[in-house]
Amino acid sequence: MSTPIDLRSDTVTLPPPEMRRAMTEAALGDDVYGEDPTVNALQERAAALVGMEAALFVPSGTMGNLVAVLTHCGRGDEIILGDQSHMFYYEGGGASVLGAAAMHTLPTGADGTLDPAAIEVAVRPANDAHFPSTTLICLENTHNRRGGMVLPPSYIAAVRAVADKHGLMLHLDGARVCNAAVAHGVSVAQAAGPVDTISLCLSKGLAAPVGTVLCGSRDFIKKAHHWRKVVGGGMRQAGVVAAAGLYALDHMIDRLQEDHDNARHLAEGLCAIKGVMLRQRAVETNIVFVDMAGTGIVPQRLSSTLKDAGVLAGATGSVVRFVTHYGIEHADVEEALSRVARAVRTA
Ligand SMILES: *Cc1c(COP(=O)(O)O)cnc(C)c1O
């Protein structure tokens, strides 16, 4: 049987050989003492990239978002975020479970936005004993469950204005903010917009094996450093993995354009197959959701039918997610399309 083409996620990326070399040769120290030169270099590099004062290296995007919540919010504070956001949907309720913060969800629009007017309505009145205290708004750029849609800088600025009016902090789950920057042809700092804090994943399309950087003001990062220790995220000779992150920021951002081109090509090809329909507003970055109900393949068999045909993808009901990433070439997309077409034809 031919090698499967793995389009489940951009987290399946393997580090390029030069990244592995950088890991082997990294200068190391004990990062809990702040003495790992490679971790320190990564943190400085990441802060500069997003245009903030400081950054903190954490093991995962989930921990980056959790540490942000622990740092921004006290017990019983309320967070306004989207009902389709990764923080609400996929992080085990960590903000509430571990952070004792309530999550006030608003409907996520098809473009990944939350209506700024609805955010304003959701902010709790101050000085009333009945209400939790709203302290934080969270956005996601690009938006995972909205097919990698990019939030325009003007939209983030509009939410910033609401946050400022009510004295709230604004956190960006920027797991794929580098994809947003490349898609809009702007800097990562511009794609992040005027937020207070951002978490940026190194282990998705940027192909590092592990790690996220949480960025913010010097004061915020000092407090976040404490919370990272509390949740067990203090790592020792973490320069081994930070070296991969540094390599990722230096060499892997610009090539994301290839993933976006491949995703568009994949989406067009999939939608040319009878019974397959695009299930998102537009293909702006590297994520493609399609609805395959029209193919007649029963939802329970979609994943296994595609897998038998040599294409790995993520199915939820009749909706299937395909993600392009480092290691997937144009020719792989062509091959995946012919495999999917054959699977649909013979199903
Ligand atoms: C992957 C992802 C995360 C979490 O990252 P992990 O490293 O898997 O914990 C957070 N937010 C978004 C939007 C993601 O896609």
Image: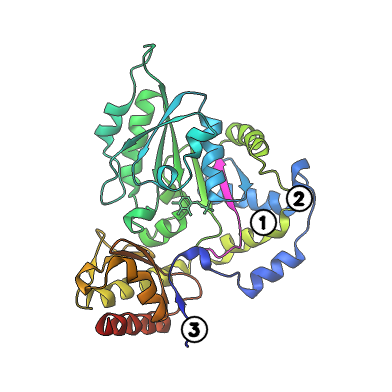
Residue 328, percent from left and from top:
46, 76
Q: Which residues are magenta?
A: 206-216
Cβ at disc 2 under 8 Å from ligand 1: no
The label nearer to you, 1 versus 3, is 3
Based on the picture, tell me whether residue 211 belongs to the magenta stretch: yes
Residue 57 lies, in percent from the top left, at: 63, 48
Residue shown at the point (80%, 51%) measured from the top left: 29
The Cα–Cα distance between marks 1 and 2, rounded to whole angstroms, is 9 Å
Q: Earlier in the sequence, mark 1 or mark 3?
A: 3
Q: Which residue is mark 2?
A: 36
Q: Nearer the viewer, residue 277 or 243?
A: 277
Q: Is residue 253 visible?
A: no
Left or right: 94 as drawn, with respect to 276 = right
CA gap, disc 2 to disc 3? Answer: 40 Å
* Disc 1 target residue: 242
> In the picture shown, does residue 269 fall above or below 74?
below
Image marks 1 and 2: residues in contact by CB distance under 8 Å: yes
Q: Would you name the residue on which mark 3 appears?
A: 3
Mark 1 Cα shell of 10 Å, populated few (<14), some (14-19), many (≥20): many
Q: Earlier in the sequence, mark 1 or mark 2?
A: 2
Percent coordinates x, y for residue 236 in the rendering: 76, 49
Total number of numbered discs in the rendering: 3
